[in-house]
Amino acid sequence: MANVLVTGGAGYVGGALTERLLLTQHNVRVYDSLLYEESYRKQVPFVLGDVRDHRSLYPHLEWADVVVCLAGIVGDGACALDPELTLEVNRDTVARLANDFDGRIIFMSTCSVYGAAEGILDEESPLSPLSVYAESKLEAEECLKDCNAMIFRLGTLFGIGDLFSRIRMDLVVNVLTARAFTRGQVKVFGGEQYRPLLHVRDVAEAITQNIDTDHKGIYNLHADNMKIGDLADHLKSLFPDLKIEKTEMKFEDSRNYRVSSQKSIDAFGFQPRYSLDDGISELKDLLVEGRVKKLGIARHSNVRFLKEAMEQEGQADAESWI
């Protein structure tokens, strides 16, 4: 029975993960700054803290056998707001963890490190990070290369994590689902770019499966490689009256990649349980029942929330929120 410290455990992936870990015999502790949250009410031992605050974090590293490293600034837009801060949070805290912690580390990276590439990409494929976010994650991976660390390069997530954490409305599946419900139409720019899609609760399952294993190194995680345009078409199965507008305008996001998760399948039997329809349906149900009162508020978007915080409080104050 391991002591598992989840940094960033109050977030989108953290919410799904703690739900899953509570079904195991492990001792779980969440360490989180509550950047996007106003409270943490889940029945899990909780420490309010900033991963950059070494003095606060260190006693919990001494307690832990395993650290699941989820804390970070996530997303291209959010990370671009302040590249220096992004590297401090996403890279430097991981470097310190690698130096100070001798136990097992499970770290979330991103398939965005592949950038734009042809063919099906595996863990040995060339890397071409196109954003500060991807660069920060790739540099963090390098910090962990000599550690007892398992690194998951995640596909584009979707779905609902748990009942406590916020819904992320800056993820393509969730965004298009919300627009299909509220507007009855979606607009797709380009549409030929691929994304490797993955339900957030399948991430939680993969992490939980590997708390006690000795797997190390880098593993892709995804369920389906899908074109953005095909994703919009797929929505019509759940929104029959949906109108889709596709434009040939060059899409501002140049990422375009398909990945293989065969290494994860071979190593620990990775098998996604949640389909694209599952993710769309669960969000649609919340919207139909009126359970999301203010869908368009900044809190649901990493970049909008951080941008507003920086504009309202000034850069120095905004940094203290991370």
Image (spheres, grey):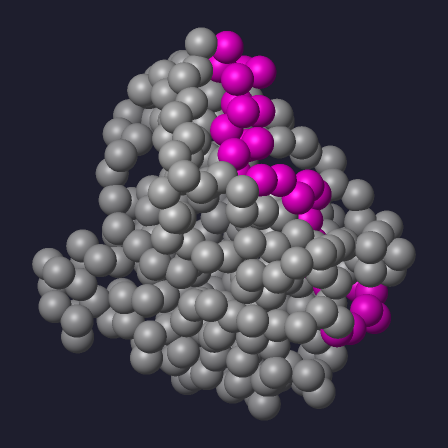
Q: Is residue 215 visible?
A: yes
Asked if residue 231 is among those painted magenta in the image, a careful observer would answer: yes
Question: Among all residues in the image, which is located at the extreme right?
Answer: 266
Residue at 42 percent across and 54 percent down: it is 253
Residue at 37 percent across and 73 percent down: it is 86
- Residue 182 falls in which quadrant of the image? top left
Asked if residue 51 is among those painted magenta in the image, a careful observer would answer: no
Position in image of residue 144 (x %, y %): 64, 81
- Residue 89 falls in which quadrant of the image? bottom left
Position in image of residue 279 (x %, y %): 57, 30
Q: Is residue 168 visible?
A: no
Position in image of residue 42 (x %, y %): 48, 44
- Horizontally, residue 43 falls left or right of residue 264, namely left
Question: Among all residues in the image, which is located at the extreme bottom?
Answer: 99
**Viewport quadrant of the N terminus:** bottom right
Q: Which residues are magenta?
A: 211-240
Residue at 40 percent across and 48 percent down: it is 251
Residue 84 lies, with reference to residue 15, above or below; the image says below
Question: Among all residues in the image, which is located at the extreme front?
Answer: 248
Residue at 58 percent across and 40 percent down: it is 227
Question: Among all residues in the image, which is located at the extreme top?
Answer: 241
